[in-house]
């Protein structure tokens, strides 16, 4: 079993930064892909940023140039550096890991609230 624990969300003023993180623990042979998603009230969950299995990064158009996804493979941890935050970035942010251990499985973090407001 694999657990993902998120931290680093919170309340920030427009234009400010936040850097949530997501640490995986448990039975991990390898991580195939990882990403950050968000879900705002009344909206569907959407991909914000991710690493593909080939290590290529991709971003939603709405966050390009402001958000950066990174990873620490030794710590099985993903980060999302969010700069120039806007009120429309307000949402619950979820991390997602695709993990290989005797088979490929998807795991989700518990979610961390990000609120951008003055």
Image (cartoon, rainbow, N blue to C red):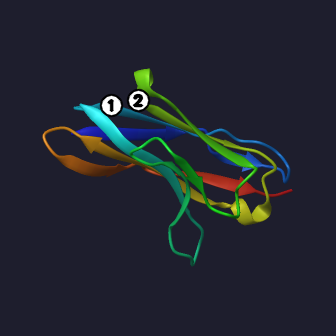
Residue 48 x/y as whole percent: 58, 57
Q: Viewer-nearest of labels 2 and 1?
A: 2
Farthest residue toward the top? 74
Q: CA distance from mark 2 to mark 1?
A: 7 Å
Residue in the picture at 29% in, 42% down = 99
- In the structure shown, which secondary structural element does the residue marked by tag 1 occupy? strand
Disc 1 crowd, CA 10 A, few/some/many (<14, 14-19, 20+): few
Residue in the picture at 38% in, 40% down = 4
Q: Is residue 104 left or right of residue 72?
A: left
Residue 26 x/y as whole percent: 26, 31
Tag 1 or tag 2, which sits nearer the N-term? 1
Q: Is residue 86 left or right of residue 39?
A: right
Which quarter of the rendering shows the N terminus? top left
The disc label shown at residue 73, or none: none
Which quarter of the rendering shows the C terminus? bottom right
Disc 2 crowd, CA 10 A, few/some/many (<14, 14-19, 20+): some
- In the structure shown, which secondary structural element does the residue marked by tag 2 occupy? loop
Residue in the picture at 65% in, 38% down = 19
- Residue of label 2: 76
Residue 15 x/y as whole percent: 85, 50
Q: Which image quadrant for residue 38? A: bottom right
Q: Is residue 2 left or right of residue 5?
A: left
The disc label shown at residue 25, or none: 1
Count of numbered tags:
2
Residue in the picture at 46% in, 32% down = 77
Dot 2 and dot 1 residues touching (CB under 8 Å):
yes
Between 42 and 59, the residue placed more toward the observer is: 59
């Amino acid at each position: 079993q694999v657990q993902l624990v998120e931290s680093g969300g919170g309340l920030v003023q427009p234009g400010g930064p936040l850097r949530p993180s997501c640490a995986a623990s448990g039975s991990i042979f390898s991580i195939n892909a990882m990403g950050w998603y968000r879900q705002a009230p009344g909206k569907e969950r959407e991909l914000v940023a991710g690493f593909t299995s080939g290590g290529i990064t991709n971003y939603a158009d709405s966050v390009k140039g402001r958000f950066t996804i990174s990873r620490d493979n030794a710590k099985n941890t993903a980060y999302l550096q969010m700069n120039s935050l806007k009120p429309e970035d307000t949402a619950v942010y979820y991390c997602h890991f695709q993990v290989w251990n005797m088979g490929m499985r998807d795991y989700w973090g518990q979610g961390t609230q990000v609120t951008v407001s003055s």
